[in-house]
Amino acid sequence: MNQLHTTPLTQDASLVAALAATAMPFSRSAEAQAESWIRTIRLHGRVGSAMQALGVGEAPLRAEYDLDGNPPPPTPVPEGDVSERVVARAHELAAAENADATGTCHLLAALFEIYGDVMDRALELHGSSREELLQRLDEITEHAEAR
């Protein structure tokens, strides 16, 4: 049996994937796609709890500009069906850690892998960082396990 079938999406992860997927065809850049993922994932699961605890809001706190005050050129969208790629990679990550289900933490890890610096910049525009978010997720996980 394929290991990926043993790690179904949690309800939260399923909702995030479905909602974000609806925005992908309308996103003209990787930045717009990353923004859609952030707006969606910040409301669901452990990642949403961590983002809300860090004050990550729906809209970016500021726009990104270069040293001359111009917006940087957009990054092309990733090849193929990016939503499908994110979910597939999240399943792989969950399976690798023998998780019972694929959750929002797995989706986030997949987003960081697929979007890289674009995702980091999007988080920074929302007033957070990968490091802060991962630290907060660790704290939430430790607290949940202590119960």
Image (tube, rainbow, N blue to C red):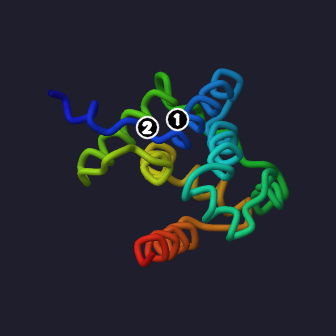
Please tell me whether residue 70 is drawn above or below residue 126 in the rendered image: above
* Residue of label 2: 9
Q: Nearer the viewer, residue 133 or 122?
A: 133
Number of other residues with Cα within 10 Å of mark 2, as a class: few under 14, some 14 to 19, many 20 or more: many
Given the image, on which type of amino acid does mark 2 rest?
Leu
- Left or right of residue 123, residue 130 in this image: left
Q: Nearer the viewer, residue 15 or 145?
A: 145
Number of other residues with Cα within 10 Å of mark 1, as a class: few under 14, some 14 to 19, many 20 or more: some
Q: Nearer the viewer, residue 143 or 77?
A: 143
- Res. 121 image quadrant: bottom right
Residue closest to the far front: 147
Q: Residue at x 63, y 56 (%)?
A: 48
Please tell me whether residue 3 is drawn above or below residue 57 in the rendered image: above
- Left or right of residue 70, residue 56 in this image: left
Residue closest to the far left: 1
**How far across and down, in percent of the image, does residue 118 sit?**
58, 50
**How far across and down, in percent of the image, does residue 92 sit?**
30, 41
Asked if the residue under mark 1 is in contact with the one under mark 2, i.e. CB atoms within 8 Å, the reply is yes
Q: Residue at x 84, y 57 (%)?
A: 69
Callout 1 secondary element: helix
Please tell me whether residue 51 is drawn above or below residue 7 in the rendered image: below
Residue 101's label in the rendered image is none
Please tell me whether residue 59 is drawn above or below residue 144 in the rendered image: above
* Residue of label 1: 14
